[in-house]
Amino acid sequence: MLYPNLCVACNNQLHASERYLCLGCQLQLPETNDHLKLENGVEKTLWGRIPFERAFSFLFFNQRGTTQKLLHELKYKGNEELAVYLGEIYGQKIRKTAESHGINAIVAVPLHTSKLRKRGYNQSLAFANGISEVLAMENLSDFMVRVKATDTQTLKSRTERWQNVENIFEVNNTQIFENKHILLVDDVITTGATLESCAGAIVKNCNCRISVASIAFAA
Ligand SMILES: [Zn+2]
């Protein structure tokens, strides 16, 4: 398999042992280490809205920083393998936390089919695939569907954002979620409205526990 031989963050030549990021950039990733901290920023954002057990993001979103470059690569250059790779890295980091909480299944926040066609792939799913592979978790992403396409959230107020994403997700096999502790995976957490809607669709229908993980936290 051929990998691009330049670091996606600093454009320096990669060594043969490096993939996507040079070691220097990988060591300097703005990691939140949320999984090691109770009441971290993500948990405070979602508190009282989702009945979650733990919530954590891999990276802080920094304008014009490495996270921004990575997300740009995922979103506009269709670098699906990079999303999987980031999931693999993060999976190793959260292994102990996931095990101690008994997290045993993973679900990516789905894209609507129209958006999927436009984007080519779902970066949340690719990231989730990387995590589930490393942690040997059951991947239940196929059983969650996005039944409505939504407008962009960017210019909306908090209330409008919530109305925009209400009832847009459905679980198409409730049985399979029963008694699981699900890691619900999104790409970037900002207001948490999308996650709130997605988690709501799960807990409404299934007796299960939910934790949350994302690539970046931008609050
Ligand atoms: Zn680099």
Image (tube, rainbow, N blue to C red):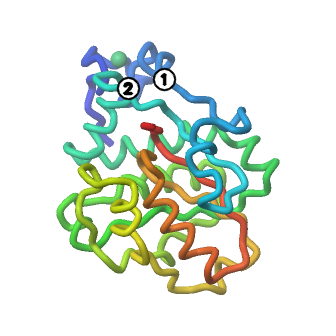
The amino acid marked with disc number 1 is Pro
Label 2 CB, ligand 1: below 8 Å? no
Q: CA distance from mark 2 to mark 1?
A: 8 Å
* Rendering quarter of residue 132: bottom right
Q: Which label was assigned to residue 90?
A: none
- Residue found 52% across the figure and 81% down from its top: 171
Label 1 belongs to which residue? 30
Query: Which numbered mark, 2 or 1, is in the foreground of this view?
Result: 2
- Residue found 35% across the figure and 80% down from its top: 147
Q: Would you say the residues marked 2 and 1 are in contact, meaning their CB atoms lie under 8 Å apart?
A: yes
Q: Secondary structure at mark 1?
A: loop
Residue 67 picture location, percent across and down: 38, 30
Of 62 and 47, nearer the camera is: 47
Ligand 1 shown in quarter: top left
Crowding around mark 2 (Cα neighbors within 10 Å: few <14, some 14 to 19, many 20+) is some
Question: On the picture, is 193 further left or further right than 131?
Answer: left
Crowding around mark 1 (Cα neighbors within 10 Å: few <14, some 14 to 19, many 20+) is some
State whether residue 170 is above or below residue 126: below
Image quadrant occupied by the C terminus: top left
> Which one is earlier in the sequence, the residue at label 2 or at label 1?
1
Of 197 and 26, nearer the camera is: 197
- Residue found 32% across the figure and 38% down from its top: 71
Please give the count of numbered marks on the rendered protein: 2
Q: Secondary structure at mark 2?
A: loop
State whether residue 196 is above or below residue 64: below
Label 1 CB, ligand 1: below 8 Å? no
State whether residue 9 is above or below residue 150: above
Residue 136 picture location, percent across and down: 65, 56
- Residue found 63% across the figure and 66% down from its top: 138
Label 2 belongs to which residue? 62
* Rendering quarter of residue 163: bottom left
Image quadrant occupied by the N terminus: top left
